[in-house]
Image: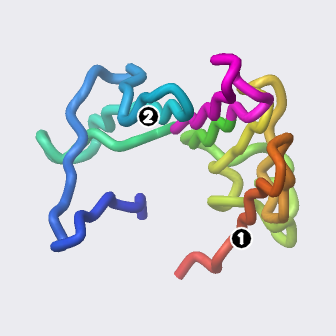
Amino acid sequence: GDSIILGLQNQVFKFEGRDDGWHSNLSNKNLQWNMQFKEFKSCPAHENMFASALSLSMHGDNDKADNSNILIVTTPEAIEECQMDPNEVCLGEGTLHMSFDGGKTFVSKPGDYHLALPAASLHTISTPHV
């Protein structure tokens, strides 16, 4: 299932927002963290809003994104290559996708991805669905 944001004392955060709207979670001169929310009509009312994408942009001293615009999105259906080959290892069984260039290209496979920032990388794994 979808992950939940928990507080330090196990508080559960429910998402409220405009369907398919982007909302700012944190914004300062060095980091901008945004989340997109999606309403799922098949879920009970007031429990049907989930984060469907997130974006992280890191800024340097020149107030311009330093090639570090990370976008993580989910899709309702798996990508074709993950549907066609049962041995293909895909993130989120083919429904989780990452972009390191602001959405121009996406990867859907686990691995180590090195970012354009000094000593910055993202490690992804795909755990078995139980």
The amino acid at mark 2 is Met
Q: From the viewer's perspective, is residue 130 above or below residue 94?
A: below
Query: Label 1 is placed on what type of residue?
Result: Ile
In the rendered structure, the answer to whether residue 112 lies left or right of residue 70 reads: right
Q: Is residue 18 above or below residue 120?
A: above
Boundaries of the magenta span? 54-69
Please name whichever residue, 6 or 129, is drawn nearer the observer in this view of the structure: 6
Which residue occupies 32% across, 58% down?
Answer: 5
Q: Nearer the viewer, residue 41 or 10?
A: 10
Place of residue 47 in the rendered image (x, y in percent of width and height, measured from the top left): 18, 47
Q: Nearer the viewer, residue 111 or 97?
A: 111
For label 1, the residue is 125
124 drawn magenta: no
119 sits left or right of 69 in the view: right
Local SS, label 1: loop
Q: Position of residue 125 (x, y in %)?
A: 71, 70
Q: Residue at x 69, y 45 (%)?
A: 97
Circle 2 sits on which residue? 35
Query: Is label 2 in a helix, a strand or a loop?
Result: strand
Local packing at callout 2 (Cα closer than 10 Å; few below 14, some 14-19, many 20+) is many
Q: Residue 92 in the image: x percent, y percent?
A: 63, 59
Residue 57 forms part of the magenta stretch: yes
Query: Which is the main secondary structure of the residues drawn in magenta?
Result: strand
99 left or right, relative to 114: left
